Amino acid sequence: MLKRLLPTICLLMPLTAALAQEATPPAPTEEAAPETETILLVGQRPGPGLWKVSKGDHVLWVFGSYSPLPLKMEWRSQQVESILAQSQEYLGPPGAHGHVGFFRGLTLLPSLIGIKKNPDGATLKDVLPADVYARWQPLKTKYLGKDDSIERERPIFVADALYDAALKQSGLGKGYDVSNKINAIVKERKIKKTDTSIALEMDDASKMVKEFKKSSLADTACFDKTLTRLESDLDAMRVRANAWAKGDLEAIQKLSYADQEAECRDALRNADFVKNQKNWQNVQQRVQNAWLTAVDKALEANTTSFAMLRLSDIVGPDSYLTALKAKGYEVVSPD
């Protein structure tokens, strides 16, 4: 129970992803998705090729993960397995996590009750604009059913639950099978695994939880963008999922979408309970810097290393690989 609850205390939702860089690829003009592509690919799929980062004869291979992906897809890449078998070190994905001691965490458990609820007993109808609330009703019925208990939760938590339920009904998932498979290979091969994430120390974790429970969040935009994406983007999600499975990166980048992740990230990052924590500032840059430092050390120490990044951290002018190019590394994209 404690292992499940402490991340909630520390992060108050998936804040590891929310406070880490969550940039999305550039959004060109939307292209219509071919109807034949709305059928999700099943069976064994390799995903995209690998990016090659070089310093002399030392190489770091970078794999681009993606979400959502087909639930019934079995991912297997002989290229990934072969290169992992040759690697001396595996760099875990960048991120940030809240840090609280074990015994301090035990004292916080009672304060978790009601952490997802709106302050002062407010409901979604009370805190959302009327037009947004009206759009929520049919999506709630379609994906979550008639359980009204969720009506008292904060919009940011409701948006997360709604999005997960919609993905599941659409045959899509978060793509954890891919990272689990890579981690299994790393463990089986006994490859050195380096955690590149940073810890966010808390000045007073108990106070932070209390501040969160009584404070409001500017999370209407997060909720609104989530509704927009579910209203208009599910077919395109399937197209992008299929494109990743086939290794077609160009197709992924051609399809723009409402980026609810950025809105939800900002709702948390700009909240007072975060601003009051001096160790929780400039997280996005600190996360990238920690990963770049880990890459420097891996390329110096090993002839072959392997890393996994979200595709959104690979593609675009502000990507992690662009930062590596600026440091003088040679970066080659997959064919």
Image (cartoon, rainbow, N blue to C red):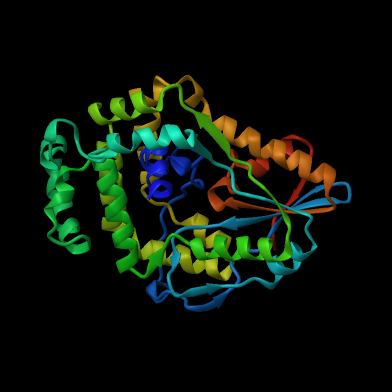
Whether residue 233 can be seen here? yes
The location of residue 315, given as percent across then percent down, is: 58, 48
In the figure, 275 relative to 123: above or below?
A: above
| Left or right of 302 in this view: 76 | left
The location of residue 259, given as percent across then percent down, is: 39, 46
In the current view of this chain or complex, which residue is farthest to the bottom?
Answer: 43
Callout count: 0
Q: Residue at x 48, y 19 (%)?
A: 278
Image quadrant holding the C terminus, namely bottom right
Q: Which residue is drawn at 41% across and 41% down?
A: 6
| Left or right of 312 in this view: 304 | right
| Left or right of 81 in this view: 30 | left
Whether residue 135 can be seen here? no
The location of residue 261, given as percent across then percent down, is: 39, 44
In the current view of this chain or complex, which residue is farthest to the right?
Answer: 57
Q: Which residue is drawn at 56% across and 52% down?
A: 311
Give the quadrant of residue 113.
top left
Viewer-side residue, 71 vs 243: 71
Give the quadrant of residue 64.
bottom right
Q: Which residue is drawn at 42% across and 70% down?
A: 71
The location of residue 206, given as percent across then percent down, is: 36, 27
